[in-house]
Image (spheres, grey):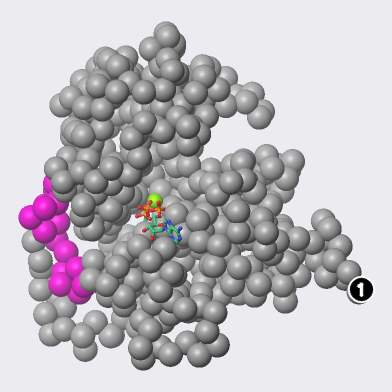
Amino acid sequence: MSSSSPNQSLEPLALSVNAGSSSLKISLYAVHSHEFVLGVDPVALLLTSSISNISAPPAKFSFKVANADGIVSEQATDVKDEPVDSIHDHASAFAHFLDYLKKEANIDRERIQRICHRVVHGGNYSDPVIISDESFHHIERLSDLAPLHNGAALSVIKACIANIPSAQSIAYFDTAFHRPMPAHISSYAINQTIAKKRGLKKYGFHGLSYAFILRSVARHLDKLPSELNLIVLHLGSGASACAIKEGKSLDTSMGLTPLNGLPGATRAGAIDPSLIFHYTNKAGKITHDRKSAVQLHVTEAEHILNTQSGWKALTGTTDFAQVTSKANLSSPDPDYENNPNRLAFDLLVDRIVDYVGGYYLKLNGEVDALVFSGGIGERSKEIRQVIGGKMACLGFEAVDAEKNGKMDTLEGVVVDLGAGRPDGEGVVEGKGKKLLVCRTDEQLEMARECALAKKFWE
Ligand SMILES: Nc1ncnc2c1ncn2[C@@H]1O[C@H](COP(=O)(O)OP(=O)(O)O)[C@@H](O)[C@H]1O
Ligand SMILES: CC(=O)OP(=O)(O)O
Ligand SMILES: [Mg+2]
């Protein structure tokens, strides 16, 4: 147990819960202030916990207490990547966390006043909402459009209401960041009467992450968010790309649901929509996911494309680190027939290039930086090296191979990956568009927003 002392603070506590497709990430903060001060965080991290591999058991549990400066270092690690057999879904993962909160950090649940929940699909909600019967049912109705996410978030919301009744739960939506997308980009080329009636349009996801990245990169480059044009890659179990123009989402690769766009751990990403009818003759049959906390109406087609595809289908693992280590990347002959890992790696690179190239044109080439984030973007030097290398033809800096190789040891929320731009005889530092890595933190994004929303504290 670290010597840090979360209990010494008498400030209100806010818990942030991020139910991802394969993970549950939870952070606890002391709320210092409800006033916005440029460059100052209104919250301070007390502890953070993560449960990964929920969809590929055994799940791994980590619980880390921050030091007095709100920093979690490896030395502050209390429990790291411990496999836990009793965790089989997001609700049991949260129950495991609550046990540790009392046992390891000696924190009384009653001290938690607000709980921020990442909810992936918010439909047309553009602002965070307090959980009430009405908002709970709104999120529940959208569960079919985010089958790996909304139900999982609702199961944790239910657990919070039951186990931490003194706290108010607030939902923060991934979709909110993408609301400014123009209609010609968010619309599909289908009958618009039906589209409007049924809400069939591109919503986009990973919005809390993009909001965090935009804010962090702006701080790093000493610019206002509204002055920035970025291409951001959030590459995790679910992967997406986003074009940000003058601080607003212009386009993103996920769509009506988080299935579209880049392939992921178990998701196919974009395919020809007709493919699924040739893959199975039961595409439209409703499957009932008994494991889900809410009643899901998911077709066999959606089940296959969301849970039986991606790296898992190509290589047998959902862990991209394993895919990379077996991909034999140094070989000039990819040997796709015999090396499914190389196929998976090169296929992801190919799809990323599609989006990055398209977004570069949509932004008229006026791009301040390409940003890597998410579990793969932050940890895979190989993906950064290959994608970064391809960006050189668009005027980006070269990848600094040394920095790229030791990214894990470099401090900071945003790390500059660039080594300058070749110019004439030599390499000129500071020239060229930037390549950045951002350690995204959806929990912090919610906690900050919550602290600063006075209406949630009245
Ligand atoms: N060293 C690594 N190299 C490549 N990929 C990694 C590495 N470490 C973790 N990953 C990938 O990151 C993914 C998790 O990303 P993350 O953004 O945390 O997930 P989630 O989508 O659940 O929020 C894992 O599925 C794994 O494939
Ligand atoms: C939207 C989405 O796919 O989120 P995650 O990557 O956290 O599963
Ligand atoms: Mg995630």
In this rendering, would 218 be left or right of 51? right
Which percent across, then down, holds residue 450?
Answer: 44, 28
Q: Is residue 156 magenta?
A: no
Boundaries of the magenta span: 289-305
Q: Residue at x 41, y 22 (%)?
A: 2
Which percent across, then down, holds residue 275?
Answer: 28, 85
In this rendering, would 215 be left or right of 349? right
Viewer-nearest residue: 63 or 415: 63
Q: Amino acid at mark 1?
A: Glu
In this rendering, would 66 be left or right of 307? right
Viewer-nearest residue: 201 or 249: 249
Q: Residue at x 14, y 61 (%)?
A: 297
Viewer-nearest residue: 279 or 35: 279
Which percent across, then down, holds residue 296?
Answer: 14, 56
Quadrant location, the N terminus: top left
Viewer-nearest residue: 342 or 387: 342
Residue 35 is at least partly visible in this image: yes
Q: Is residue 431 above or below residue 77?
A: below
Q: Is residue 293 magenta?
A: yes
**Count of labels in the image:** 1
Determine which residue is flagged by label 1.
425
Q: Is residue 448 above or below residue 403?
A: above
Q: Quadrant of ligand 2?
A: bottom left
Which percent across, then down, holds residue 406?
Answer: 60, 54
**Circle 1 — which element?**
loop
